[in-house]
């Protein structure tokens, strides 16, 4: 939300704020389903009274079941979603049964992770406040300046052909004419609001110091298709007595 106020003395006041909700990142904040008892990382620690055995492994099928202090198996049906909230796990029993899987039966403490009950979505608050004032008084002058020059060049090319003849002696005569024309220039266009037909075309050259670089078909001919290029065919007959 943002509010703008035109204060006295040509001062603009801008104030705004935004609240963005950022959900937890499952990969970074996954301390529940990525930890005990759903995920187990067995390990063996060195001690003064025991030796570390190498060359053995613990498969997932060998992991012991998870029980509550009352002896109830937590993951009896294999679906973690069916486990009630705040279920207590018997850590000591699980660690002792896990130690039996190693050759030295050495006890290794498990690393546990948890999430605070108040852990939730992150709120990102953004606040902005600004003051703006324009200094200076317009002293007049000009806006857009237009300069008329005589550097452009245009040419109108036309081809006119005709054929005429007479059918037999004293018979009717005919005549056919064909005209093809095309307009080529450096820069051209159509002005709007002056009564000109067709679309309004901006006819300012890209480089006013080199208009020859844009020499080609006239702009009004490209837009209207008929003004720059025209073809006319005329056929007439006459009787001679």
Image (cartoon, grey):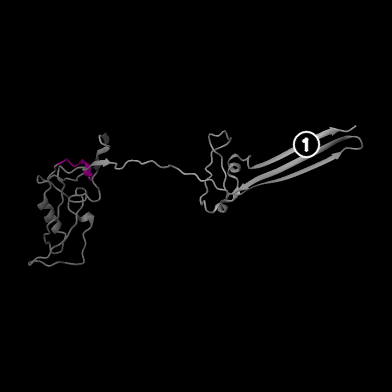
Q: Residue at x 16, y 45 (%)?
A: 74
Q: Residue at x 68, y 44 (%)?
A: 181
Which image quadrant is residue 111 in?
A: bottom left
**Quick check: can you spot residue 1?**
no
- Labels in figure, total: 1
* Image location of residue 180, percent across then percent down: 70, 43
Nearer-the-camera pick, 27 or 15 = 15
Q: Residue at x 55, y 34 (%)?
A: 194
* Image location of residue 20, percent across then percent down: 25, 41
Q: Main secondary structure of the magenta part?
A: loop
* Image location of residue 1, percent across then percent down: 27, 36
Q: Secondary structure at mark 1?
A: strand
Q: Quadrant of the C terminus?
A: top right
Query: Is 231 one of the magenta-colored residues?
Result: no
Residue named by callout 1: 235
Per the rendered image, the range of residues in magenta is 78-85
Q: Residue 213, relative to residue 200: is it above or below?
A: below
**Quick check: can you spot residue 210?**
yes
Is disc 1 surrounded by few (<14), some (14 to 19) or many (20+) residues within 10 Å?
A: few
Instruction: Tell which residue pokes out farthest to the left in this image.
Output: 49
Give the left or right position of residue 192, taking residue 227 as reference: left
* Image location of residue 95, percent across then percent down: 12, 55
Nearer-the-camera pick, 36 or 232 = 232
Which image quadrant is residue 141 in?
A: top left
Nearer-the-camera pick, 106 or 10 = 10
Instruction: Tell which residue pokes out farthest to the right in this image.
Output: 169
Give the left or right position of residue 113, taking residue 203 as reference: left
């Amino acid at each position: 939300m943002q509010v703008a106020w035109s204060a006295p003395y040509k001062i603009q006041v801008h104030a705004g704020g935004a609240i963005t909700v950022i959900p937890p990142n499952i990969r970074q904040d996954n301390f529940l389903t990525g930890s005990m008892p759903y995920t187990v990382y067995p390990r063996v620690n060195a001690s003064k009274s025991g030796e570390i055995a190498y060359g053995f492994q613990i498969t997932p099928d060998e992991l012991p079941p998870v029980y509550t202090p009352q002896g109830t198996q937590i993951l009896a049906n294999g679906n973690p979603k069916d486990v009630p909230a705040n279920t207590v796990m018997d850590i000591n029993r699980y660690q002792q049964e896990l130690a039996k899987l190693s050759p030295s039966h050495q006890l290794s403490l498990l690393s546990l992770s948890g999430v605070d009950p108040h852990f939730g979505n992150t709120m990102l608050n953004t606040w902005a406040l600004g003051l703006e004032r324009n200094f200076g008084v317009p002293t007049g002058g000009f806006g857009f300046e237009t300069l008329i020059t005589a550097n452009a060049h245009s040419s109108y090319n036309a081809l006119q052909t005709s054929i005429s003849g007479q059918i037999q002696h004293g018979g009717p005569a005919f005549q056919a004419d064909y005209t093809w024309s095309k307009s080529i220039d450096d820069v051209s266009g159509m002005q709007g609001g002056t009564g000109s037909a067709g679309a309004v075309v901006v006819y300012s050259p890209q480089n006013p110091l080199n208009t020859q670089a844009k020499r080609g078909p006239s702009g009004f001919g490209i837009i209207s298709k008929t003004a720059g290029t025209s073809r006319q065919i005329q056929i007439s007959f006459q009787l001679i007595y």
